[in-house]
Amino acid sequence: MPIIDERHWTDANHDSACVGRPSVRYTMLLPIRLLGAGFLSLTTAVGRFALFVTRSLRAVLSARRLGRRVVSSIQEIGIRCLPVILVVGAFTGLVIGLQGYYVLARFGSKGALGTLVALTLIRELAPVLAAIMIVGQAGSALASELGIQRNSEQIAALETMAIEPLGYLVSPRLLGALVVFPILTVFFTIVGIVGGWLSGSMVLALESGVYWSAANRAIELADLRECLVKAVVFGLLTIAICAYKGYTTHRHTNVAGARAVGKSATSAVVWSSIAILAADYVITSLLA
């Protein structure tokens, strides 16, 4: 009868009992593995987005009927978003004027209300809020449109006809955004300043001449330059993100059909809003 080593029998049973359980070393390295996988996924996504934007801008040189499609994009984004911009800009100015008046009144500086409203809108709120409103109105529609075209194989049909899809669908939108975003931001600023005047002079007791004089003295060329730079950067960045999310609906969603289009549009709005705030911080840091 063979002699069984008791220690060997115990080790064998221990090993068989641990089958299917993660080892201690694997458990300790799991956070590092997840962090590395997340970093690689983020790097891959950023690289694909950068290539998408580069190819879209390069496709401008070979795009067909580019001028007509750019004008159509300007009309589509501008006309669709103008009412929202005017309404949001007016109420933003009204709120800033109302709250700013009560805050400045505590320090005996009610005459600086025009300065507060003008600089707050020009340097920060006008480009940021205008961009977010445009993304919510036109950016989501762009992502949905491109997502539907991807799912219905219209983009594949363009490739079959030897038409560059990026030059036909994306490049005109990017060029149109470079024109529309600064214009709508200027409208937002003007309406907001008028709204601040309505709150300070028409509703409250501030004289109109004091308000407009303070606003005129506060605005400098550097402030206007920063506002327009932000508008251009936000326009290019957000429309590129929305177009990318819609164009790659088949790749970046784990669902299909109408749900994939809706998910792409939602993701486009969320990431565009985050990009606006991040870019706003970077530009303010560089130009301040």
Image (cartoon, rainbow, N blue to C red):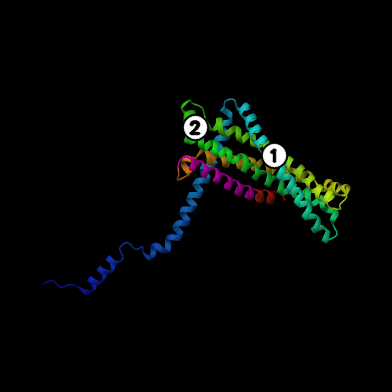
Q: Return the mark for residue 155.
A: 2
Q: Is residue 265 visible?
A: yes
Point 76% across, 43% down: residue: 191
Circle 2 — which element?
Answer: helix
Residue 29 lies in quadrant: bottom left
Between 261 and 238, the one lying in front of the other is 261
Is residue 264 inside the magenta stretch?
yes
Query: For the residue labelled by badge 1, is the local secondary structure a helix, a strand or a loop?
Result: helix
Q: Earlier in the sequence, mark 1 or mark 2?
A: 1
Inspect this view and state whether residue 226 appears.
Answer: no
First to last magenta residue range: 256-278
Three-letter amino acid code at disc 1?
Pro
Residue 96: x and y in percent read 76, 52
> Percent x, y for residue 231?
68, 42
Q: Which residue is pictured at 82% across the width and 47% down the height?
A: 215
Q: How many angstroms separate mark 1 from mark 2 (CA)?
A: 32 Å
Residue at 21% over, 74% down? 6
Dot 1 corresponds to which residue? 83
**Main secondary structure along the magenta-highlighted residues:** helix
Tally of numbered discs: 2
Q: Residue 13 location in percent, x, y?
A: 25, 69
